[in-house]
């Protein structure tokens, strides 16, 4: 049985629950900034101060989450940021390479929209699971 299941007897400290919530709020703020400004969701998520502050909080507080259901949330948040970064770089490279063939800008447009939706999905799903006091995933 994984120690991340909702049946885990070890409950997290209240301040850790607050920090996890705060990280989702900061990531959500970045998404809203991406929607409301000229930036894309993914660029605001990766390069905006709210998400950068959120990732720093993740790394600082992650050791305290070990053995609680919040461990999956910290992992989920950190992976969302770094997988988003990796996929953004890959989309940008493919777009640059295909620009001479005129489809590069379409690759960027489609790729960045899909990545923005993916990031928003992961933040919303994680936040909803947190509000239910459940891990994001149980098989960890």
Image (cartoon, rainbow, N blue to C red):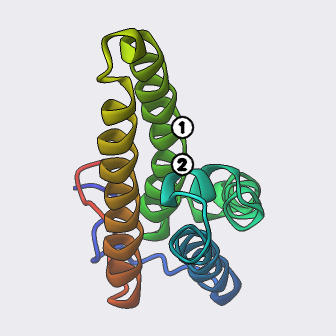
Q: Whole-Å distance between the Cαs marked 2 and 1?
A: 6 Å
Task: Say the numbered circle drawn on residue 81.
Answer: 2
- For the question of whether residue 67 can be seen, the reply is no
Q: Is residue 9 above or below residue 116?
A: below
Is there a contact, CB below 8 Å, between mark 2 and mark 1? yes
Q: Image point 47% across, 75% down: which residue? A: 10
Tell me if mark 2 has few (under 14), some (14-19) or many (20+) residues whose alpha carbon lies within 10 angstroms of its own: some
- Closer to us: mark 2 or mark 1? 1
In which quarter of the view is residue 3 placed?
Answer: bottom left
Q: Image point 53% across, 59% down: which residue? A: 74
The secondary structure type at the circle numbered 1 is helix
Tell me if mark 1 has few (under 14), some (14-19) or many (20+) residues whose alpha carbon lies within 10 angstroms of its own: some
Could you say where residue 69 lies in the image, as x and y percent from the top left?
Answer: 41, 70
Residue closest to the eye, 86 or 88: 88
Q: Is residue 130 above or below residue 35?
A: below
Residue closest to the eye, 29 or 109: 109
Residue closest to the eye, 79 or 136: 79
The secondary structure type at the circle numbered 2 is helix
- For the question of whether residue 82 can be seen, the reply is yes
Could you say where residue 17 lies in the image, as x and y percent from the top left?
Answer: 58, 83
Q: Could you tell me how many numbered marks the image carries?
A: 2
Q: Image point 64% across, 57% down: which residue? A: 62
Could you say where residue 89 lies in the image, as x and y percent from the top left?
Answer: 51, 27
- Which residue is denoted by mark 1 in the rendering? 85
Horizontal relation, residue 103 to residue 33: left or right = left
Horizontal relation, residue 8 to residue 18: left or right = left
Horizontal relation, residue 30 to residue 117: left or right = right
Question: Which quadrant would the N terminus be assigned to in this image?
Answer: bottom left
In which quarter of the view is residue 103 placed?
Answer: top left
Q: Image point 48% across, 26% down: which residue? A: 92
């Amino acid at each position: 049985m994984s120690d991340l299941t909702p049946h885990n007897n070890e409950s997290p400290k209240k301040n850790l629950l607050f920090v996890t919530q705060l990280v989702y709020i900061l990531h959500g703020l970045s998404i809203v900034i991406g929607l409301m400004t000229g930036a894309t969701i993914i660029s605001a998520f990766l390069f905006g101060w709210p998400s950068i502050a959120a990732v720093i909080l993740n790394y600082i507080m992650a050791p305290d989450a070990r053995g609680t259901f919040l461990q999956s949330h910290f992992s989920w948040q950190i992976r969302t940021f770094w997988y988003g970064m990796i996929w953004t770089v890959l989309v940008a490279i493919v777009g640059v390479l295909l620009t001479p063939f005129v489809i590069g800008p379409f690759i960027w447009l489609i790729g960045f929209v899909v990545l923005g939706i993916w990031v928003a999905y992961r933040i919303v799903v994680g936040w909803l699971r947190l509000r239910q006091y459940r891990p994001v995933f149980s098989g960890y």
